[in-house]
Image: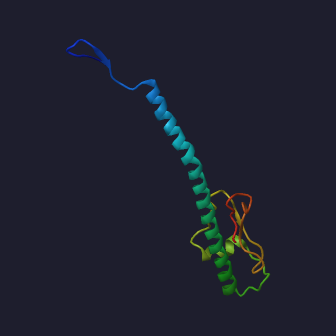
């Protein structure tokens, strides 16, 4: 918009192209720094949730084995037998699936395991 002053000179108001380019460059730099950190934080949170779920599932397997009097090495139906000891069947937030072997010989595992970083495995 042009303004007319009392002296007759005209001044254009607004931002120059250089100013806009500087702002865009700063925003791009901040995004380049923030986005990888956000992705890393999300992956870490997913792994931590998965590991906590594996711990809960291991406790549920042990509880089920004690209540049913199952010996070490006994096989069981992983999902159907431990669901009563959990609130609901858990889902890995990164898309993995859970499984387990025999009682006392293995711990529950996530199908993602160590194929992703950070790992979805009990330490």
Q: Horizontal and vertical percent for residue 93?
A: 61, 59
Q: Quadrant of residue 8?
A: top left
The location of residue 67, given as percent across then percent down, is 66, 86
Question: Which image quarter holds the N terminus?
Answer: top left
* Quarter of the image with the C terminus in it: bottom right
**Image: 12 above or below 44:** above
**Residue 44 location, quadrant:** bottom right
Count of all numbered marks drawn on residues in the image: 0
Most foreground residue, 117 or 23 = 23
Image check: 45 left or right of 106? Answer: left
Residue 109 place in picture, x, y as percent? 72, 68
In the depicted view, which residue is nearer to us: 74 or 39? 39
Q: Position of residue 121 (x, y in %)?
A: 70, 67
- Figure check: 90 above or below 22: below
Q: Residue at x 75, y 79 (%)?
A: 103
Query: Of all residues shown, which one is farthest toward the left?
Result: 6
Q: Is residue 114 left or right of residue 6?
A: right
Query: Residue 11, relative to residue 57: is it above or below?
Result: above
Give the residue at x 31% y 18%. 11
Tell me which residue sits at (54%, 40%) in the image: 29
Tell me what residue is drawn at x 69 percent, y 59 percent.
96
């Amino acid at each position: 918009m042009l303004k007319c002053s009392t002296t007759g000179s005209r001044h254009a108001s607004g931002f120059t192209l250089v100013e806009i380019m500087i702002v865009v460059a700063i925003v791009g730099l901040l995004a380049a720094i923030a986005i990888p950190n956000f992705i890393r934080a999300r992956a870490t949170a997913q792994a931590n949730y998965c590991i906590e779920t594996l711990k809960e599932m291991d406790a549920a397997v042990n509880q089920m084995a004690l209540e049913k009097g199952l010996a070490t090495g006994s096989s069981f139906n992983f999902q159907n037998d431990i669901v009563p000891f959990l609130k609901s069947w858990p889902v890995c937030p990164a898309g993995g699936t859970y499984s387990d072997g025999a009682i006392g010989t293995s711990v529950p595992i996530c199908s993602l395991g160590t194929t992703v970083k950070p790992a979805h495995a009990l330490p």
